[in-house]
Image (cartoon, rainbow, N blue to C red):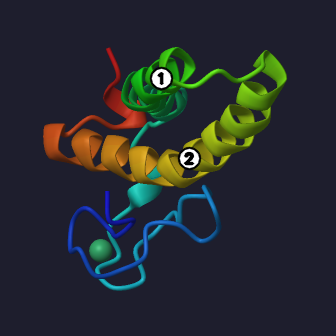
């Protein structure tokens, strides 16, 4: 989740926002072999909605705001939070795949 190589914890896992560096520059571990295709966005959506929807519902019940005001606040906020959480979730999914020995070659 620290966006570092799961094998050594030193080398950078990504070479961009979400592009996985195929080989770790520090330990030469092949990080490109770990699948994270749709699971990272799923984890991101699950976390963001479950963590930030209750405050939005609380705000809706507490303050009288129009739907447009709520949308103007919530949509950019949720978008920014999602973009922050997505690479962390992707790193976590790759780290989990590394810890379980799951690679693209041995997927069930
Ligand atoms: Zn490494």
Asked whether, in this view, residue 6 is left or right of residue 34, the answer is left
- Where residue 55 sits in the image (x, y, percent)? 43, 29
Label annotation for residue 53: 1
Seen in the picture, residue 69 relative to 64 is either above or below; the reply is below
Residue occupying the point 34% across, 37% down: 103
Closer to the camera in the image, 84 or 31: 84
Quadrant of the rendered image containing residue 39: top left
What secondary structure is found at the residue carrying circle 1? helix
Closer to the camera in the image, 29 or 95: 95
Which quadrant of the picture is home to ligand 1? bottom left
Residue designated by label 2: 81
Q: Label 2 neighbourhood size at 10 Å, few (<14), some (14-19), many (20+)?
A: some
Asked whether, in this view, residue 20 is left or right of residue 104, the answer is right
- Where residue 21 sits in the image (x, y, percent)? 53, 66
Asked whether, in this view, residue 20 is left or right of residue 6, the answer is right
Label annotation for residue 100: none
**Residue occupying the far bottom of the picture:** 26
Residue occupying the point 32% across, 27% down: 106
What secondary structure is found at the residue carrying circle 2? helix
């Amino acid at each position: 989740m620290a966006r570092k190589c799961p094998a050594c914890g030193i080398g950078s896992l990504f070479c961009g926002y979400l592009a996985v560096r195929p080989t770790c520059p520090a330990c030469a571990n092949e990080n490109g072999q770990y699948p994270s295709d749709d699971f990272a966005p799923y984890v991101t959506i699950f976390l963001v909605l479950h963590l930030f929807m209750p405050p939005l519902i609380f705000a809706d019940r507490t303050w009288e705001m129009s739907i447009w005001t709520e949308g103007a606040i919530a949509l950019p906020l949720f978008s920014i939070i999602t973009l922050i959480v997505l690479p962390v979730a992707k790193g976590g999914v790759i780290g989990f795949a590394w810890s379980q020995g799951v690679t693209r070659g041995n997927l069930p």
